[in-house]
Image (cartoon, helix red, strand yellow):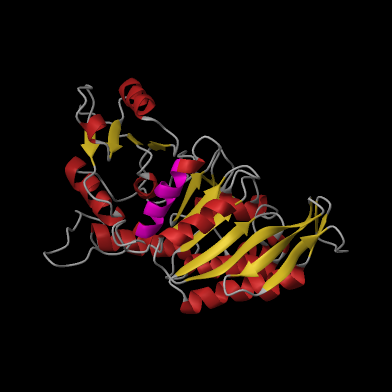
Amino acid sequence: MTTEPAKLTFIADAMLGRLAKSLRMLGYDVLYRADIDDAELKRIALRERRVALTRDHEIAESNLPIRIVLIASDHLEEQLLQTVEELDLEVEGELFTRCLVCNVPVEDVAAADVRDSVPPYVFETQEHFSRCPDCGRIYWAATHVENAREWLGRVLGKDGGAARRPAAGERPAPPPAGNLFVTGRPGVGKTTLIKRVLTDVDAAAGGFVTSEIRAVGTRVGFAITDLRGEEGVLAHVSIESPFRVGKYGVNREDLERIGVKALDGAIASSDLVVMDEIGRMELCSEPFQEAVGRALDSAKPVFGTIQDRDNPFLDEVRARPDVEVVRITEANRDEMREVVAGKLAALLGRGRDDA
């Protein structure tokens, strides 16, 4: 009697977040943390007998008794091709069976059980749902999943068989539109990072940013500004509104007049869609949520900030296969400017030298 060989498991270094998520789409167990250091990566790989995926030559040249794959390319589709070919990975049968955020196998769940956990329009239009038993995120086959299936088919072969390497002179198949978000605790510098990175990349950006409104040194509200210059009040202590976040009344009219209009305008005419941020105030508006969905489903990359809290809509955004989320902290925020600028330049189809 023969036993089937154990399926490979992986650990990916901090520069390979999108490759980790792509392998999870194929059903593979891939540990990934944006803040993992080399020493911890090697310890986990050795202890759990995981294949280490890395861009770091020092890790690749270590003498650990484990399989290590040095990923050669900066481009996601070439990274995935190399991994599948070098390790002869099976790519059929288990698509989208694993949580793309926390790496746990998902479980089917009855629609009635998620009625209060998904946006109403999703509940009304979808029949099949699955849920991660660890983080509780809920999945369904929306447009972004179909886009991801099509991309995997182009990269790995229409029948899901052996990977197809592009011919000489042929550009690799592009991945689903890349969407990059920064998260972190309030006040850590997410918006400052967004603004600085936008000066580092050569792209016609559209969308919106938010900022504090202060009076006599005290924060009294938040402004929302279209990148073309139109400004409104997102929330203010003096606004009477049925939509409140803490002491602030949310101004849905300006959120939709400026925020929704800015996102739709960026989708139509910009190279890059900027949304700073997706948070509690912005989630008071269904039209705004729908505009976020249109931007993420579009052919334009999205660059933004996302609040670090549990919420069905925020969970849906973070779990998308075409979204990467990086975390900024007080300890790493100086170095994150270059890291995030490099990731954004890659999404825009440029190397850092061209950015």
Tell whether position 343 is magenta.
yes
User: Which residue is located at x 43 percent, y 57 percent?
Assistant: 322
Q: Quadrant of the C terminus?
A: bottom left
Q: Left or right: 198 with respect to 150?
A: right
Q: Left or right: 71 with respect to 262?
A: left
Q: Left or right: 254 with respect to 23?
A: right
Residue 38 visible in the picture: yes
Q: Position of residue 332 (x, y in %)?
A: 49, 38
Between 311 and 25, which is closer to the camera in this rendering? Answer: 311
Between 166 and 63, which is closer to the camera in this rendering? Answer: 63
Provide the major secondary structure of the magenta segment: helix
Between 135 and 251, which is closer to the camera in this rendering? Answer: 251
Most distant residue in the front direction: 216
Q: Position of residue 104 (x, y in %)?
A: 47, 38
Q: Position of residue 264 (x, y in %)?
A: 56, 75
Task: Report the label total.
Answer: 0
Q: Position of residue 36 (x, y in %)?
A: 42, 32
User: Which residue is located at x 62 percent, y 57 percent?
Assistant: 278
User: Which residue is located at x 57 percent, y 40 percent?
Assistant: 135
Tell whether position 338 is magenta.
yes
**In the rendered structure, which segment of residues is drawn in magenta?**
335-345
Residue 129 visible in the picture: no
User: Which residue is located at x 23 percent, y 26 percent?
Assistant: 66
Most distant residue in the left direction: 168
Q: Quadrant of the N terminus?
A: top left
Q: Left or right: 193 with respect to 339?
A: right
